[in-house]
Image (cartoon, rainbow, N blue to C red):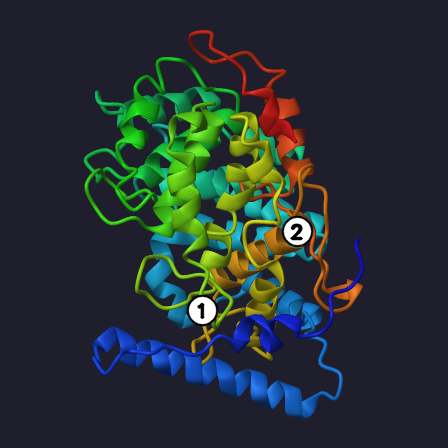
Amino acid sequence: MDGVPTPLRCFNEYHSAEMLVDDGVETVTSVEQKKVERSIKEVVSVYKQMHSLPQPTLLREQHYQYLKKGLRHLSDAYECLDASRPWLCFWILHSLELLEEPIPTAVASDVCQFLSRCQSPTGGFSGGPGQHAHLAPTYAAVNALCIIGTEESYNIIDRKKLLDFLLSVKQPNGSFVMHVGGEVDVRSAYCAASVATLTNILTPKLFEDTATWILSCQNWEGGLSGVPGLEAHGGYTFCGTAALVILGKEHMLDLKALLRWVVSRQMRFEGGFQGRSNKLVDGCYSFWQAGLLPLLHRALFKEGESELSRQHWMFEQQALQEYILLCCQNPGGGLVDKPGKSRDFYHTCYCLSGLSIAQHFGNMDLHHEMILGEEENRLAPTHPVYNICPEKVSKALQHFHQLPLPRQPGPLAPDHLES
C-alpha cells in the first residue's frame, strides 16, 4: 500500500468546489440537489466537530451483525422482495465476503438448498420457489452459489437446463428477454453472459449477434441505455460493457466517449456517483459507475491508449471512499443511498462493492491499494466483471471448465477474465 492518505483531504480540497449554482432558475431537480448538498455538508461538519483527527471508519462489526441476521430473519418490509429472494442471498453473501467474514457451513448448506428450490424445472432460477425462471435471479443465484464455492453449491446448478433456458429467452436480433414473454433490456444480455461463462455453457449460437445489439445501446452521450434510443444509465452501462468484456468485444465501443460520460457522473461536491445526468448522488452507483473504470482502463490499454491509461486514475478514489464512509453508513449496520435514507441489503452490497473498487483499482497492473483511514477499513477486492471475489471466479471457472459443454462445442471463457 502507498501509505494512508491524509484524513478528509478530499472534503477539505476536492469538496471545496462551490455547491450548486442554479443561476436564479429554480427547478425540482435543483431544489433536490441543494437539499442533498446541505445534508452532506452537515454530516461532514458534525463529523469534524466530533473528531479532532478525523479518520473515517468502516463499521465492520455493525455491518456484519446486520448481514448475519438477514440470512435468517427478515422483517415484514421485505415482503415486496418475494420475487427477489436469490438477490437477497447474493447481496448478503457478497457483502460478507467483502468484509472477509466466513459463512458458517450450516448456513451455506441452507442457502444452497433454498436456491435449489428456486431452480425451475425448465432451467434457470426464479425469484422464489414455484415462480417462473427469470434472468435476474438466475444471475444472483449463480453468483451466490459461486461465492459459497463448495461441491454442494456447484452441483445445484443444472447446466443443461440452464443452457436450455438461456436459449429460450434469446431473441433473433441478439438480445435477450428477462423471462419468457418478458421485457428486453441490456441487463439480460449481461446476466446471460455472466452465468454462461461462469458455468462453462457459453456457445457461439447462444450469443450470436448479441454484441451488435449491445453496441446499438451506446448513445450520443457515450453511455449505454437499456434499449437502443433511450437515455444513458449507469446500471445499463455497466451491464452492457461487462457483457462485451465477457464476449471479448469491448473494443467495438466508443471507449473515449464512454470514458467521458462515466467520469462526468462523479459528483463534484458529494464525491459519490449519480446514475444519469442531472440526477442525485446514490451510493449504489459507487459500483455501477466506478466498477466500469477498471474495465475501461484495460480496454483502453489493449487498444494502444497506453498514455491515457497510465494517467492518474480515472476518478477521485478518496472522495468516493469519503462519501461511502461518512454519508452511507447506518450506525446500526448496513449502508444507504444517501443521508436520510433507510438501510437495505441492496445498497449495503453495492456501496461496499464500490468501496472495494475505490480501494483496489488504481494503476496499470490493477494491483494498487489506496485505503482511506486505518487498515481496518480495507475490504477484499471484487472482480469488476462478475462482482464476486476474484478467487471465487477462478475457482468456479476451474470447476466448470473440467466439465463438458452440455450441447454444441464452443469457446471457453476468455483467459483475461480469470484475473
Amino acid at pointer 2: Glu
Asked if one can make out residue 257 in the rendered structure from this viewpoint, the answer is yes
Q: Which quadrant of the view contains residue 238?
A: top left
Secondary-structure class at tag 1: loop
In the image, what residue occupies the spot 47% across and 19% down?
201
Residue 263 at x, y percent in the picture = 46, 52
Q: Indicate left or right for 9 with 22 as reference.
A: right
Q: What residue did someone put label 1 on?
A: 337
Q: Which quadrant of the view contains residue 315?
A: bottom right
Mark 1 vs mark 2, CA separation in Å: 21 Å
Q: Is residue 177 above or below residue 283?
A: above
Of the pair 311 and 201, the residue shown nearer to us: 311
Q: Nearer the observer, disc 1 or disc 2?
A: 1
Residue 302 at x, y percent in the picture = 55, 26
Quarter containing the C terminus: top right
Are the residues tagged 1 and 2 within 8 Å (C-beta)?
no
In the image, what residue occupies the spot 50% across and 53% down?
287
Secondary-structure class at tag 2: helix
Amino acid at pointer 1: Asp
Asked if one can make out residue 92 in the rendered structure from this viewpoint, the answer is no
Q: Residue 296 — which label?
A: none
Residue 129 at x, y percent in the picture = 38, 45
Q: Indicate left or right for 176 with 240 as reference.
A: left
Q: Is residue 255 above or below residue 12?
A: above
Q: What residue did someone put label 2 on?
A: 97
Most distant residue in the top direction: 409
Q: Is residue 168 above or below residue 322?
A: above
Of the pair 30 and 159, the residue shown nearer to us: 30
